[in-house]
Image (cartoon, rainbow, N blue to C red):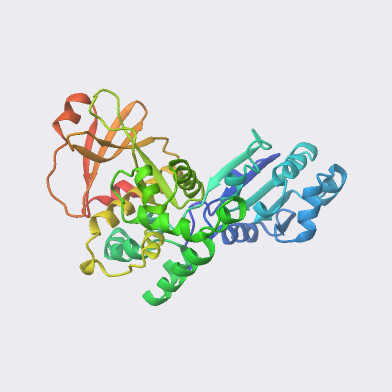
Amino acid sequence: MKIPRYYQNLTQYIKPNKVLAIFGPRQVGKTTLLKDYLMTINKKIKYRLDSGDDIRIQELINSLNFPKIKEYAKGYELVAIDEAQKIKNIGQGLKIMVDEIPGIKIIATGSSSFELSGQIGEPLTGRKITLILYPISQIELNNLYNNYDLKNRVEEYLIYGGYPEVIVSDTFEEKKRILNEIVGSHLLKDILELEKVKGSKILLDLLRLLAFQIGNEVSLSELGKQLGLDYKTVARYLDLFEKSFIIYNLRGFSRNLRKEITKKSKYYFLDNGIRNAVIANFNPLELRDDIGRLWENFIISERLKNQSYKRIYANNYFWHTWDQKEIDFIEEKEGKLYAYEIKWKSGKISPPRDWQAAYPNSKFSLISRDNYLDFIL
């Protein structure tokens, strides 16, 4: 089964003398997306495709030798480099092509190493267009299934998530095997390769603690105590997780009330399957006590994909007061506030009085199994 990706047609994002940088978590289909696109332009555009795994390409681009790099790209309308994060000085090398070869178009795919190492940020300022590819979204699955089918499959997505290989696997055992392989071999690879981290155990232990605290405010000092780490180290690891597209940091919202909590954060996994693999729990919903957390994580991660793909520019928060009034998800966009309470079960619910009093012009909605597709599609 082939799942059409949201960025299936890359033509609209490719510009002369610009680098189209496609990055995101490992194993989400960046290479497949690139190769599928190149097949559509085959014989229409003269292009070359190389891999960052190729030692010759590594040496060439890392050399920053202007004549040799120009010679490498000369005569091609498009140069595509897959796994580009493996090439040292890739940003500077791509800058040479963009600046020295009139009309050249470039695509570079890579994992989160791009951001972790800062390889393409500063060198390509004003010279790049960035796309982030996530695990399969409900938006993309909606091209294959109608709303009725998506709702009937929602338990599967809550437990096994949306990594492409997981989605197309026929059995639950195979899905478990793939997720365990991703967590064991790929999830932390960029961090371990680029950062001074002693080993994966402490990182996985931290992820497990986060996995059990979805929907709760997280204290970095408490996490540190449980792991024998100082506050700054925990904060650094969490930042690495976020840049590696493993988790998302949702901060507290405050504008008017003294009793609003803003210093703590909540953390959500960008994929439910990864979260469940980290805690080794793939039980069906009827055997779980964390359905609410699974649902909240699923809705927020899918909304983040929706915002990214549809270019919805919003600041995201949660809202909580010292007297335990709270709202799960707040979007601040175009000068307006949109508040959402996320519940597995449907029903009637009203916003807290303190919220209504402080932000009378805000909108409030309940996101449940009845209406969630309107929020994430």
Residue toward you, 313 or 359: 359
Place of residue 200 in the rendered image (x, y in percent of width and height, measured from the top left)? 51, 60
Does residue 171 appear anywhere in the picture? no
Residue toward you, 210 or 285: 210
Which residue is depicted at the point 60% across and 60% down? 31
Numbered circles on residues, count = 0
Which residue is depicted at the point 65% across and 50% down? 108
Vertical side of 33 occupied by 100: above or below: above
Place of residue 277 in the rendered image (x, y in percent of width and height, measured from the top left)? 39, 65
Place of residue 192 in the rendered image (x, y in percent of width and height, measured from the top left)? 57, 56
Residue toward you, 151 or 177: 177
Residue projecting furthest to the left: 348
Place of residue 205 in the rendered image (x, y in percent of width and height, measured from the top left)? 42, 58
Does residue 15 appear anywhere in the picture? yes
Vertical side of 99 occupied by 26: above or below: below
Which residue is depicted at the point 47% across and 41% down? 232
Residue 145 lies left or right of residue 64; in this view the side is left
Residue projecting furthest to the right: 67
Residue 171 lies left or right of residue 68; in this view the side is left
Residue toward you, 192 or 333: 192
**Location of residue 284 (image quadrant):** bottom left
**Location of residue 312 (image quadrant):** top left
Residue 77 lies left or right of residue 323; in this view the side is right
Vertical side of 109 occupied by 333: above or below: above
